[in-house]
Image (cartoon, rainbow, N blue to C red):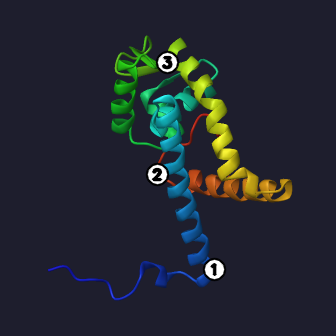
Amino acid sequence: MYEIASESPFALLSDDETRAWYAYMKVNLRLRYEMNRQLRADHGLSLADFDVLVALISDEQTTLSVSDLAIRIGWERSRVSHQVRRMADRALVETTVSEADKRVTVVSLTPAGRDTLAAASRSHVALVRRMFLDTLDSRSARQIALLFEQIYDNLITHGTLPRPADHP
């Protein structure tokens, strides 16, 4: 019924490209698993909850439209809407209709959301340090930051999402 490809998708990449992409994917998937597990166990938050809270706290007004929140964290609007609804049920965020445009839903960080984020941040940062940053000396940290910044700029230039407001 199903035909199995005779060659791996990685056969289309050079050895160095395959190694780089596979290493990135392994780190990305495993690190997201570990962060989600730790946030759930220690704070009752999902990594998705944390992503939304961090995006909101990063905004000067701690308020973003659903569309701007989706652009900032790289999700589809429908996923953001569902996530925000679940978080509003737990009083981590609140939603209102925009005064300027009644078609726009605005998401705001609540005091409970701010407190939850503050409580989770110390152990989350400790995990990120232990799992990722402790493997890097300061020179390597600068190099990897530069590389990921270049990759992110390329994603913004060639990707399909609009440019985030926080990325000039």
For residue 139, above or below residue 55: below
Amino acid type at circle 2 is: Thr
Nearer-the-camera pick, 54 or 124? 124
Q: Secondary structure at mark 3?
A: strand
Amino acid type at circle 3 is: Ser
Amino acid type at circle 1 is: Asp
For residue 119, above or below residue 6: above
Q: Earlier in the sequence, mark 3 or mark 2?
A: 3
Q: Nearer the viewer, mark 3 or mark 2?
A: 3
Mark 2 = which residue?
Answer: 160
At 85% from the left and 53% from the top, the residue drawn is 138
Mark 1 = which residue?
Answer: 16
Q: Secondary structure at mark 2?
A: loop
Residue 66, position in %: x, y?
A: 43, 28
Q: Which mark is residue 108?
A: 3
Nearer-the-camera pick, 17 or 103? 17
Residue 64, position in %: x, y?
A: 51, 24
Nearer-the-camera pick, 10 or 50? 50
For this orientation, the residue located farthest to the front is 41
| Real-space Cα separation, disc 1 to disc 2, in angstroms | 27 Å
> How dense is the environment of label 2, judged by Cα within 10 Å: few (below 14), some, or many (20 and up)?
few
Q: Nearer the viewer, mark 1 or mark 2?
A: 1
| Real-space Cα separation, disc 3 to disc 2, in angstroms | 26 Å
Nearer-the-camera pick, 6 or 122? 122
| Real-space Cα separation, disc 1 to disc 3, in angstroms | 44 Å
Identify the image quadrant of residue 115.
Answer: top right
Q: Earlier in the sequence, mark 1 or mark 2?
A: 1
For residue 150, above or below residue 95: below
For this orientation, the residue located farthest to the bottom is 6
